[in-house]
Amino acid sequence: HRLFPHVTRACQGVVFQTTEIVKKLIEKTSTTTGLQVTVDILHKFYRTGRECTDDFKRNMKIRFDEFLPQWNYRTAPVPT
């Protein structure tokens, strides 16, 4: 969360024509305290609206992030 304003500033006023332009701009981002950004672009398509199975719901525990639980979470299998 301390890095997002710097990323926004680095991309300000630029028209995003390709993902490579965005990647280069974001990779250049750093803060005065030394935080830097690593960028990986995923070229995979994810379907929206997919439903998970009942088995998944029973066997996976959802762990919500403490800082932003509405946005960040992890799933982990429940030990049997």
Image: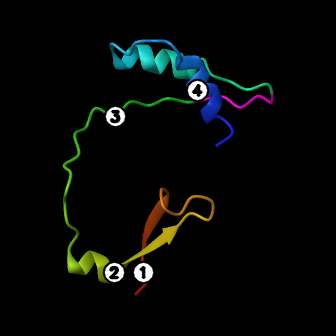
Q: Is residue 16 left or right of residue 56?
A: right
Which amino acid type corresponds to the residue marked 4 in the rendered image?
Answer: Val
Q: Which residue is mark 4?
A: 7
Local crowd size for mark 3, using a 10 Å CA cut-off: few (<14), some (14–19), many (≥20): few
Q: Is residue 73 above or below residue 42?
A: below
Q: Which residue is mark 2?
A: 59
Dot label at residue 42: 3
Question: How far across and down, in percent of the image, does residue 49 sit?
Answer: 19, 57
Q: Identify the residue shown where x is 44% and y is 31%.
A: 40
Q: From the image, state whether disc 3 or disc 4 is nearer to you.
A: 4
Magenta region: 33-37
Residue in front for this viewpoint, 22 or 34 = 22
| Residue 53 lies within the magenta run | no
* Local SS, label 4: helix
Which amino acid type corresponds to the residue marked 1 in the rendered image?
Answer: Val
Q: Which residue is mark 1?
A: 78
Q: Earlier in the sequence, mark 3 or mark 4?
A: 4
* Local SS, label 2: helix
